[in-house]
Image: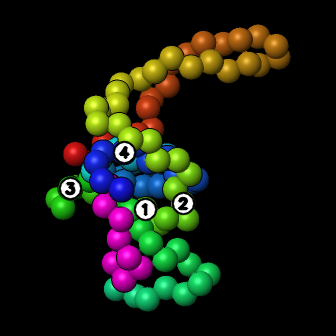
């Protein structure tokens, strides 16, 4: 797995900027289970994905990756249109994008 990917995780995570995200985008490098300085067992993830560069990245446990979409172009970091349905009424609104850009 080489190149830039949009990685969607099963759960929210904190990025180096201190904010919560559900996705990370950037160059992906697959790492073994010794990256954190400990040897994992069969009840833990035995591989990790480093998303980003050596200077700016997140490390995501393989068991937390839900989707991996190859995408060379940087996704938008601006608000996007969304909607909710409350009491049968469609309410349109903008929401922030929860993609960490690790570039």
Q: Magenta residues, as a range? A: 28-35
Which tag, 2 or 3, sits closer to the chain's start?
3
Quadrant of the rendered structure where residue 59 is? bottom left
Q: Is residue 74 above or below residue 56?
A: above
What's the residue at 30%, 45% (across, down)?
Answer: 4
Direction from residue 55 to residue 34 in the image, left or right:
right
What's the residue at 38%, 76% (across, down)?
Answer: 32
Residue that badge 1 annotates: 60
Where does the C terminus fall, quadrant-wise? Answer: top left
Density class for disc 4 (Cα within 10 Å; few <14, some 14-19, many ≥20) is: many
What's the residue at 43%, 89% (across, down)?
Answer: 39
Where does the N terminus fall, quadrant-wise? Answer: bottom left
Which tag, 3 or 4, sits closer to the chain's start?
4
What SS does tag 1 mark?
Answer: strand
Residue that badge 3 annotates: 53
In this orientation, does residue 12 appear?
no
Calculate the distance from the C-alpha at mark 2 to the C-alpha at mark 3: 20 Å
Calculate the distance from the C-alpha at mark 1 to the C-alpha at mark 2: 7 Å
Instruction: Provide residue 6's location: percent of width, then percent of height.
Output: 40, 43
Which residue occupies the foreground of this view, 55 or 30? 30
Quadrant of the rendered structure where residue 48 is? bottom left
Which tag, 4 or 1, sits closer to the chain's start?
4
What SS does tag 4 mark?
Answer: strand
Q: Main secondary structure of the magenta part?
A: strand
What SS does tag 3 mark?
Answer: loop
Q: Nearer the viewer, mark 2 or mark 4?
A: 4
Which tag, 3 or 1, sits closer to the chain's start?
3
Density class for disc 3 (Cα within 10 Å; few <14, some 14-19, many ≥20) is: some
Residue that badge 2 annotates: 64
Q: Is residue 35 above or below residue 1?
A: below
Q: Nearer the viewer, mark 4 or mark 1?
A: 4
Please say if the residues under marks 1 and 2 sit with CB atoms less than 8 Å apart.
yes
């Amino acid at each position: 797995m080489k190149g830039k990917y949009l990685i969607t995780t099963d759960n929210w995570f904190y990025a180096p900027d201190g904010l919560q995200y559900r996705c990370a985008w950037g160059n992906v490098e697959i790492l073994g289970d010794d990256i954190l300085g400990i040897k994992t067992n069969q009840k833990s993830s035995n591989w990790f994905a480093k998303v980003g560069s050596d200077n700016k990245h997140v490390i995501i446990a393989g068991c937390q990756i839900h989707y991996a979409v190859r995408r060379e172009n940087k996704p938008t970091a601006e608000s996007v249109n969304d909607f909710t349905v409350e009491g049968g009424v469609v309410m349109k609104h903008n929401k922030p994008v929860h993609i960490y850009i690790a570039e």
